Amino acid sequence: MFLSRWIQAPLYLGLIVAQVVYVWRFMVELKHLIVLGFGGKAAETTIMLIVLALVDVVMISNLLIMVIIGGYETFVSRLRIEGHPDQPQWLSHVNANVLKVKLAMAIIGISSIHLLQIFINAGRPAVTDRELLWKTLIHLTFILSAVALALIDRFMQGGRPQHAGNRAMGNVTEQPSTAQDRRIA
């Protein structure tokens, strides 16, 4: 049963392929930006929308990295990179709850970019008031979901204050300071 966790490894390899696709997409958009930007014929709004598309691709790529590395480390196998200079800071204290909250925050960022693109295009006839309303409500739903996940994570930790070094990811290792605290713990 324990070895069944390796069934997930191909899923993470597939996400690495998706990451390559996003790098390719970024390069195509960047080339498009350079051609339009130095051609001098593009409107500022067009340049801004392309830059937002590039930021969107980067944010989705960051989301993929969090899922690939964090998910593999949490659910499949340890990467054994402690002390490596390239080790992501967040990886040392990642768990399933932390990963969910980080993913929710990344989704909010991506949704924000999409919403901003819609607002920039709001004056165009193709964008309806109904579309603006629904996308705004969906964005607010993402925000409420992220807040709920963070609160649930905090409640699961017991709502205890944490040391600054452990606060971000919920790893509390402090020892009770008084005899009464030790009896309670």
Image: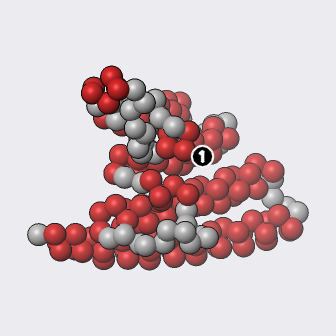
Q: How is the image coloured?
A: secondary structure
Identify the residue at image location x=81%, y=58%.
42
Quarter in which the N terminus is drawn: bottom left
User: Horizontally, is 153 left or right of 65 in the view?
Assistant: left
Question: Where residue 164 sits: x, y (%)?
Answer: 56, 39
Residue 124 visible in the picture: no
The residue positioned 22% from the left and 69% from the top of the image is: 5
- Tell me: residue 158, above or below residue 34: above
Name the residue type under label 1.
Ile
Query: How many callouts does the rendering have?
Result: 1
Q: Nearer the viewer, residue 117 or 157?
A: 157
Examine the rendered structure and indicate whether residue 118 appears above or below residue 147: below
Q: Between residue 153 and residue 128, name the one nearer to us.
A: 153
Query: Residue 23 in the image: x percent, y percent?
Result: 58, 72
Residue 128 appears at what percent x and percent y? 53, 35
Alpha-carbon neighbours of circle 1 within 10 Å: few (<14), some, or many (≥20)?
Answer: some
Quadrant where the C terminus lies?
top left
- Please say whether residue 4 is visible from this viewpoint: yes
Nearest to the observer: residue 35 or residue 174: 174
Q: Which residue is mark 1?
A: 113
Kindly state the secondary structure of the residue where label 1 is placed: helix
Q: At 32% across and 70% down in the image, what residue appears?
A: 77
Q: In terms of depth relative to the viewer, which is nearer, 94 or 110? A: 94
